Structures are given as structure tokens and as C-alpha cells.
Image (cartoon, rainbow, N blue to C red):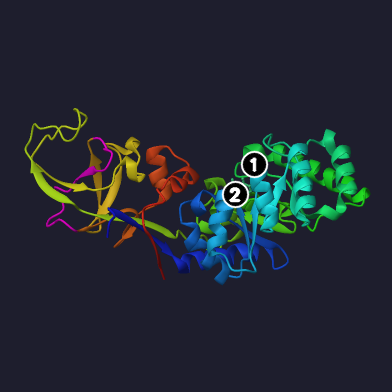
Amino acid sequence: MFNTSYIEISRKAFRSNIRYLKKIIGKDTVFSSVIKGNAYGHGIENIIPMAEEAGIDHFSVFSAKEANDALKVMSPGSRIMIMGFLDDAETEWAIENEIEFFVFDMGRFEKAIENAKMLKKKARIHLEVETGFNRTGFEYAEVSRVTELLRREREHYVLQGLCTHYAGAESLSNYLRIKNQIKLFRKFGRYFARHDIQPVMKHTACSAAALTYPNTIMDMVRFGIAQYGFWPSPETQMFRFRKDAKDASPLKRMLSWKSKVMVVKNVEAGNFVGYGSSFLANKRLRIAIIPVGYANGFSRALSNTGRVLIRGRRVPVIGTVTMNTMTVNVTDIPGVEKGDEVVIIGKQKRLSISISSFCEMSEQLNYQLLTRLPADIPRFIVS
Ligand SMILES: Cc1ncc(COP(=O)(O)O)c(C=O)c1O
């Protein structure tokens, strides 16, 4: 009710993905579930309880806003780690609420210590070091200044982690860059160890790194895309396919996106369909209008190229995708009527439309498509 489409989330597929990924990292490594971007479009409120059921108690987000959303649904024993932006007031809030956060520059580190002193509460920090991604993280040239501060302010923080992020572990073309990042991360680790600074955990791996570079696994892995059943890239999938030959498809898709036929009608030959003149009916057509358009996350780039499933058949999008609707050609499918189920992503009878084919058609990364699925599309967990 009150929506033109909905998303189904499969609990069974999620469980299976977690089992597979846990087997890869082993039982001594912490599984941090990355739930930024509204849990990659799946809904923070859906993923946290399912992850907790699967034994996960560590969650990674980008911002204080996401951490606050997570706090509302999380069990008391679980922990949150903010990997990205925090302003000064949010830093204070994070310390107060015992939320872990990345520290990657002096200003932020000093602010954290100042707030910790004021609140008389230790800041739970993860020191992020720059190893080659060139985004956030302390440079190696700063290591002695950082060490000085770490040694001086010991009572005001807990060093929960030493961490970094890889620059494209999903592609073999970055092999050398990743190797160099691992080397530099180890150098940071040795420097801190020599100066009696021991983080509780070292963590560097995202999905692609954990799936393809076993030595990046360390004490914790920050799993994003893979836990939702998607491969970071076809290369990662091929690499694992060689290793897990028994199971050709160890990651299971867990998201389906569905709607309903709104109107069915005929168009006589010689008429254009939709805005402008991008589609001309060259014969009498039967068309169906679906109440999902680019405002609902169905890219306009799919005009005249997208596909959806109706009555177990694949049907093409014709004409331009509008703000709230798309039109599909159902001429060859007898009996299509108002109210018929439309699968935009997922399975219907023997056919399926995968996120990856959908992404290829609309030239988007799966990360991009998932996180752009509007938060107001209702999500339901199915078994
Ligand atoms: C710092 C950090 N760690 C982990 C991840 C998770 O990456 P993935 O979804 O590829 O597993 C991200 C995602 O962008 C990230 O920015």
C-alpha cells in the first residue's frame, strides 16, 4: 500500500553469504558488516537484525547519521564504527555513545582527545593510515608526530584498530599497487610496535581484498558488497570460481525489486510511444505501463534498452523512461492484464534479471545502483 514498487530481501540468501564469507576469513577474524549507503540499498533496519542473528556484532558506516540509524535497531552488545565524516559535535556524540571511529588527521585526533577529556570517557579510535589509495589516512611522514600524540594521551583513547583501505583490490591490473599498500601497512605496524603502540585489531580488507588476497584478512574484515550476494567484479568471481570449484555460485543474490502492471492498451502502427519520437510502433502493439520511473531508481538510460519480466517472459522497455513510469511491449504475451506482477530485478518462473545485467544496460556499478534505490521503496524480508 502507498507504493508503486517493493523490494524483497531474502534471509536465506543472506545467511548463506555470511556462512561462505565466514569460512573464508576463519573464526578468529571479526566480520564487520558494512551497512553504509542504507546497507547498500537493502535497508539498515533489515540487515542489522539478520546480521546479528548470523552472529555478527560489528557494523561499519560512513557517517554519524548512519551510525544513529544503526543505533536505533542494533542490540546493546553490538558495536558501530564510523569510517568517514564526523564534524566536531558528532565526534563528541560518538565518544559519548561509545561509537568507534576512524582518525585520519591531526585535527580530528586532537579534537577526539579534547572531547574525551571533557567527557571523561575514552575515545575508541581506529587509526587510518595512507598506504596508496590517496583518500584519507596519516602519511608515513607523519608517523612520529602521531606516535608522540598516541604516547602522550594514552589514558584518553582506546586504539581499537590500525587500518587502511585498498585502491581497487577487485582488479588484477592493480596487483602491484595493492602489494605495495600491504607492504607499507606492515611498515606502519612495525613502527608503532617498536614504539609500544599496539592496536586491538589490524584491519585492511574489504570484500575484494578478502576474497583475493588472503594476507589482507588480519583481525577484522570490513565486508560490504559480498555479504549482499554481489561480486566486487567478474575477476573476483573468476578467482573464487577456481578456488571453490565445487560451488559455482557461492554468493546468492538477496534482493528482488517488483511492481505491478498499471495499464494495458493498444497502440496502432505509425504512432510514437512516450515523449518525443524515440520509439515508433511499426505494427499494432499491446503495451503495458509500469508505475516505476527514474524518480524510483529506474535509470533513464534504460529507455528503449531495459527489460523486465512479466508472466515469466522477458519484455523490452520501449520509449523513454519517464519520472514515474516506463512502458513495455507485451504484444507477444497473451493475457497480460492490470495487476500482473512485474519483476524489475530478480526471478520470475524460469527467468531472472540480475543486478549485473541491469547495471550493464544502464552503465552503472552494482554499488551505485544498489545505493541509489530510493529509501522509501518498502522492503520486506522473505525467507
Ligand atoms: C573503508 C572501507 N572499507 C570497506 C568497504 C567495503 O567495501 P566492499 O563493499 O567492496 O566490501 C568500503 C566501501 O567502500 C570502505 O570505504
Residue placed at 65% from the left, 54% from the top? 81
The disc label shown at residue 370, or none? none
Residue placed at 48% from the left, 61% from the top? 45
The amino acid pointed to by label 2 is: Ala
Q: Which residues are magenta?
A: 320-339
Q: Secondary structure at mark 2?
A: helix
Q: Earlier in the sequence, mark 2 or mark 1?
A: 2
The disc label shown at residue 64, or none? 2
The amino acid pointed to by label 1 is: Asp
Counting other residues with Cα less than 10 Å from the Cα at mark 1, is it few (<14), some (14-19), or many (20 or more)?
few
- Can residue 166 be seen from the camera position used here? no
Residue placed at 70% from the left, 41% from the top? 178
> Is residue 203 or residue 171 the one in the foreground?
203
Counting other residues with Cα less than 10 Å from the Cα at mark 2, is it few (<14), some (14-19), or many (20 or more)?
many
Q: Are marks 2 and 1 in contact (CB under 8 Å)?
A: yes
Question: Is residue 276 depicted above or below 209 in this figure?
Answer: above
Residue lying farthest top?
A: 277
Location of mark 1 (residue): 87
Question: Is residue 338 depicted above or below 142 in this figure?
Answer: below
